[in-house]
């Protein structure tokens, strides 16, 4: 197992190099650079922009060098934990992303838990009552959930939380806690706000998982060993939870590793709509202003997360399913 | 009964698939809805009472108007009331209907000119007297006093076609690369698989956002439309190529393929005559399910101002109007374009599910 993991990790290295090159190309694609857009902004506000000052700035951040050199500067820094500098925020990218990453993960984990807690029992229930009235209505609700764009769900949830439940519009903290130090009261305040994005972000995933669990469960319930278990007189509860669910849940576990990175990138749009202090809106803003190192590092981070998620998925599956381990 | 059994035992694969598909009522209805929707994009100029940029400057944020048959003096032809403007205590301009003024609904009314199947005309399916100060706003108006129904109908052109064209590109790329890499194997396969692996290492939404942000803001509308379409299909083809490759790998070792090869069939013949028909069912299923994903993606990108940008109109662009919560509170009808997205996506998903069942007609 350990050698397998190490081998997989080593295989990641060439992939990472190609991904970093592709990321760099993508963030270089927009015409001009950050200072061009800044210059344009300054020109609009009629303040005098000094060409020489901009050239000096470009030189300072190596933007005057050929692309491959710029790439080497960036990637060389990345390896040492220096992900470059955000032009707009005038701070190191690592700090900016770092301080928002915690909340992003808390939110994604929350959505993950929500998805599992809601989707798995409903999936089991739906499969056990196949083609019943309740199965149809649950499947239909899941279908609808998949078909509403998540930014619209976010808008509606925000609308509901403000105008029906008297909550605040977006954000994760009330005004008084926004800049306060961490305390129990602040955590409590966070939890009060967190459920909106957690539910919204988890909605589409819940629907997909529910359908997956239902199909997988139906598949298992048809197997001969379930019939055997019933025939020898085992209690139905025992048959379902000890025999059927334990096998039917394997496909869910195998996708769990992928779910966290998917939730982090899936939450971007929702976070922008809800105005959350997470990494998504930061990325969006960076794309708009061509704050290239910030945008690039985030994209790269997500790709790395996805790769690790893949690996984690395989390991998890091997852990829960002895048939795979033995191969 | 025996007649049905006779047909079943002699029917070809496609006939069986059709028989199975026909039994699925929901999918049939979805198919009809989608056909109507796409027909709507052809006739949007004619169906829409106004042009997409026709501004009623004095009629911003008019709530959806109803058509009436009865008035205080009895039964009439369908008509709409005129609008009365008044200002409430917070200084907001509100519109209520003016019982004094009535506009009778006209079929084949004249109005803004639009090009219809290649020629210019000013005929619209319905409308009210174009000389009137008010318009007929069945879905209300936006901030600039533009009729939302007309804008949704025009927006359908972009929102509905972008998914279809994007999927077509994905299907062509995915099918060609999937078949070649499965059939020839070797370095072709290796290269394709590594490329797919790299592309899939990127998370979809952020990659779409980053690439869309790279579209220069000064390109013309058609170019940016096609760039968005290309970006959306960039990742779409990879999953298709994988499925097609897997299927081709298993078909390749089938006896009928070997027989064809032994009889001297060229690669081209084997691929187009024996392999592609064998994977066509899978391709159709995956393509149908990919369309709604692209429609949703386009709407999200446009909503964030990264995809289709004004003055072009798509459903995502229209939803931008409702982005502000206060605006939305007073003008809920601005979310109506979302209803169209949901209906389209729902229909495509039902259709895809039915295709999936029908593509495998030998089970059950």
Image (tube, rainbow, N blue to C red):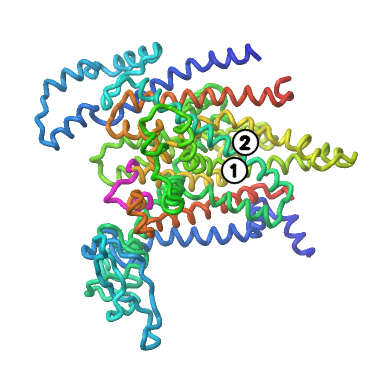
> Could you say which disc has been placed on residue B247 in the image?
2
Asked whether residue A183 is in view, the answer is yes
Question: Closer to the camera, B82 or B128?
Answer: B82
Badge 2 marks a residue whose secondary structure is: helix
Q: Secondary structure at mark 1?
A: helix
Q: Is residue A238 magenta?
A: no
Q: Residue at x 83, y 36 (%)?
A: A225
In the depicted view, which residue is nearer to us: A315 or A138? A138
Q: Callout 2: residue from which chain? A: B
- Would you say A283 lies left or right of A207 here? left
Q: Which residues are magenta?
A: B305-318
Name the spot of residue A32 as percent of width and height, x first: 23, 29
Prevailing secondary structure class for the magenta stretch in the rendered image: loop
**Disc 1: which residue:** B282
Q: Height in image: B138 above or below A31?
A: below
Which quadrant holds residue B25? bottom right
Was residue B307 drawn as part of the magenta stretch in this picture? yes
Q: Residue furthest bottom?
A: B73
Task: Classify mark 2: residues with Cα within 10 Å, few (<14), some (14-19) or many (20+).
Answer: some
Q: CA distance from mark 2 to mark 1?
A: 9 Å
Is circle 2 on the same chain as circle 1? yes
């Amino acid at each position: 197992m350990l050698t397998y993991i190490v081998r997989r990790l080593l295989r990641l290295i060439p992939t990472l190099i190609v991904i970093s090159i592709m990321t760099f190309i993508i963030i270089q694609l927009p015409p001009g650079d950050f200072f061009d857009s800044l210059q344009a902004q300054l020109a609009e506000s009629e303040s005098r922009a000094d060409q020489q000052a901009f050239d000096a700035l470009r030189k300072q951040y190596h933007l005057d060098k050929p692309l491959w050199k710029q790439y080497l500067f960036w990637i060389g820094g990345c390896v040492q934990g220096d992900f470059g500098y955000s032009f707009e925020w005038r701070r190191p990218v690592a700090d900016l992303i770092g301080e928002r990453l915690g909340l992003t993960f808390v939110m994604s984990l929350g959505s993950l838990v929500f998805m599992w807690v809601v989707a798995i029992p409903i999936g089991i229930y739906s499969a056990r009552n196949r083609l019943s009235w309740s199965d149809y209505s649950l499947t239909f609700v899941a279908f609808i959930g998949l078909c509403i764009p998540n930014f619209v769900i976010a808008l509606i949830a925000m609308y509901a939380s403000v105008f029906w439940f008297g909550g605040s519009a977006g954000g994760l903290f009330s005004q008084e806690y926004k800049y306060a130090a961490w305390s129990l009261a602040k955590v409590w305040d966070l939890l009060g706000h967190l459920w909106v994005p957690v539910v919204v972000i988890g909605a589409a995933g819940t629907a997909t998982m529910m359908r997956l669990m239902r199909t997988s469960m139906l598949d298992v319930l048809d197997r001969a060993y379930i019939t055997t278990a019933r025939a020898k007189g085992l209690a139905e509860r025992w048959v379902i939870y000890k025999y059927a669910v334990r096998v039917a849940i394997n496909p869910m576990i195998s996708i769990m590793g992928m779910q966290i990175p998917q939730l982090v990138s899936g939450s971007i749009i929702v976070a922008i709509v809800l105005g959350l202090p997470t990494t998504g809106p930061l990325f969006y803003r960076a794309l708009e202003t061509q704050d290239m190192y910030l945008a690039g590092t985030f994209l790269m981070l997500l790709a790395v997360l996805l790769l690790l998620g893949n690996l984690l998925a395989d390991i998890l599956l091997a852990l829960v399913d002895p048939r795979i381990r033995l191969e | 009964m025996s007649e049905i059994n006779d047909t079943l035992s002699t029917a070809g694969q496609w006939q069986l698939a059709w028989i199975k598909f026909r039994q699925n009522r929901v999918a049939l209805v979805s198919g009809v809805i989608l056909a109507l929707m796409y027909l709507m994009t052809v006739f949007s100029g004619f169906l829409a009472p106004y042009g997409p940029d026709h501004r009623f400057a004095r009629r911003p944020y008019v709530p959806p108007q109803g058509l009436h048959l009865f008035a205080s003096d009895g039964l009439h032809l369908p008509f709409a009331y005129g609008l009365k403007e008044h200002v409430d205590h917070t200084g907001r301009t509100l519109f209520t209907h003016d019982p004094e003024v009535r506009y009778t609904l006209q079929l084949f009314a004249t109005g803004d000119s639009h090009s219809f199947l290649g020629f210019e005309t000013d005929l619209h399916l319905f409308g009210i007297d174009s000389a009137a100060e008010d318009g007929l706003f069945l879905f209300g108006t936006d901030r600039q006093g533009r009729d939302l129904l007309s804008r949704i109908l025009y927006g359908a052109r972009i929102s509905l076609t972008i998914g279809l064209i994007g999927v077509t590109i994905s299907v062509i790329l995915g099918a060609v690369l999937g078949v070649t890499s499965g059939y020839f194997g070797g370095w072709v396969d290796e290269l394709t698989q590594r490329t797919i692996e790299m592309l899939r290492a990127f998370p979809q939404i952020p990659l779409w956002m980053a690439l869309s942000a790279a579209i220069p803001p000064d390109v013309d509308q058609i170019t940016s439309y096609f760039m968005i379409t290309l970006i959306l299909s960039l990742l779409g083809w990879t999953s298709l190529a994988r499925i097609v490759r897997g299927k081709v790998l298993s078909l390749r070792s089938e006896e009928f393929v070997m027989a064809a090869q032994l009889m001297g069939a060229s690669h081209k013949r084997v691929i187009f005559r024996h392999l592609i028909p064998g994977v066509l069912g899978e391709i159709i299923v995956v393509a149908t399910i990919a369309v709604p994903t692209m429609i949703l993606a386009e709407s999200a990108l446009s909503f964030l101002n990264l995809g289709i940008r004004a003055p072009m109109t798509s459903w995502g662009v229209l939803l931008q109007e409702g982005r502000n919560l206060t605006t939305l509170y007073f003008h809920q009808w601005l979310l109506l374009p979302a209803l169209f997205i949901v209906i389209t996506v729902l229909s495509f998903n039902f259709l895809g599910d039915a295709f999936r069942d029908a593509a495998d007609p030998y089970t059950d």
